[in-house]
Amino acid sequence: MVIPDPYGLKRVIGERGVLPQRAKRLDPSLPCRESELLIDVERLNVDAASFQQLRDSAGGDPARIAQRIREIVQERGKMHNPVTGSGGMLIGRVKEVGPKYPARKRLKVGDRVASMVSLTLTPLQLEGIDRVNVDNGQVDVRGHAILFATGHYAKLPDDLPEALALAALDVCGAPALIHRFVSPGMTVGVLGAGKGGALSLTQARRSLGGHGRLIALDASEDALALLSGLGLCDAALRVDATQAVEAMEKVCQATGGEMCDLVVNCASVGNTEMATLLATRAGGMAIFFSMATSFTTAALGADGIGKDVTILVGNGYVPGHVELTLDLLRTEPALRQFFEERYRV
């Protein structure tokens, strides 16, 4: 069957040949088209980099954050933060399945789903915002969204709290990449003690199989203490990752000069690329999973310090990433406790 407009090009306003993620504005209007999925949206999970920017610019005021989200969605037809360039994901109920939507036989009206593609490419229209949770970046809303034929989704599990599943699924590409690249004997550094960092450390622990070392790096003493207290890392280094030389020196001391075989950057702030590279040994790998990453800075920075490091930019989609992440939440009590205590989900 030929799928019409699988990438949603016809939802782009005023720009020919531009994909929805790069578009300035999208058309979220109804009706749902034949290759689309229509969702009654109940909650947005704004990505960490975007929510931190929104929270900082609003002085932490939930009402001002909500107003800015309304403005962005009204202006752009999607939740695409113009400052960070990032979005997040959503959950809701299936309202309509187009007759040529590829997964139409696996879905029915009323199914609860989470979008597994960025809000930066998802047509979205809001009728109202009911609550902003400043602790976890989740926003209770009323409205509708549209997924294209190529847009991945996940059915929400019945055995996990909704807020917990949403928080973890937003960053589920990170542990899936860890599963792919970590092997026993490695020293793994994880920059950022948030959701992606905790998931990455948990999967790395599994992949190391008791042979290797885990180092968590973050500026928050409380977050590091929680990770360390739950046994999610072997060493917790309080580091301002925008100060690359300081980060390098602390990692050097912690590793006896060996540095890390793999460093995963899950930070929610910018200007942490060089700390990541300097913490990685020559011949090692750096995975940038942060939406605050500048590829130019990372690539030219590695060149500038003369270090042979394989640089990987995580795109958020890895086959099997949903199942892997949900399994971690179900089987790793320490990880679940981290989410419940740190993000109150």
Image (cartoon, helix red, strand yellow):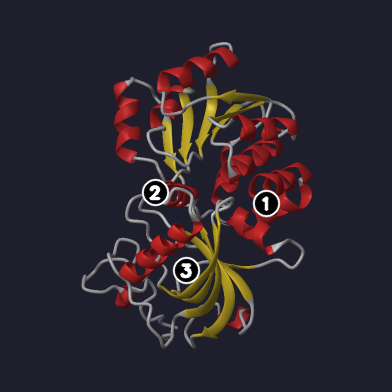
Question: Residue 343: x percent and y percent?
Answer: 64, 49
Asked whether disc 2 touches disc 3, contact meaning CB atoms under 8 Å apart, the reply is: no
Q: Quadrant of residue 185?
A: top right
Number of numbered tags placed on the structure image: 3
How far across and down, in percent of the image, does residue 26 sit? Answer: 32, 72
Compared to residue 80, the image places residue 103 above or below, namely below
Of 192 and 203, nearer the camera is 192
Q: Secondary structure at mark 2?
A: helix
Residue kind at label 2, given as amino acid type: Ser
Q: Which mark is residue 57?
A: 2
Q: Name the amino acid, label 1.
A: Arg
Say whether disc 2 or disc 3 marks the residue closer to the N-terminus: 2
**SS of the residue at dot 3?**
loop
Label 1 secondary element: loop
How far is the residue under mark 2 from the one under mark 3? Answer: 31 Å
First in sequence: mark 1 vs mark 2: 2
Label annotation for residue 344: 1
Q: CA distance from mark 1 to mark 3?
A: 29 Å
Q: Earlier in the sequence, mark 1 or mark 3?
A: 3
On the rendered image, what quadrant is the N terminus found in?
Answer: bottom left
Residue position for label 3: 151
Q: Residues within 10 Å of mark 1 (few under 14, many from 20)?
A: few
In this rendering, the label closer to the viewer, 1 or 3 = 1
Q: Position of residue 147 (x, y in %)?
A: 46, 73
Q: Amino acid at mark 3?
A: Gly
Name the residue: 61% across, 85% down: 109
- What is the quadrant of the C terminus in the image? bottom right
Q: Residues within 10 Å of mark 3 (few under 14, many from 20)?
A: some
Q: CA distance from mark 1 to mark 2?
A: 23 Å
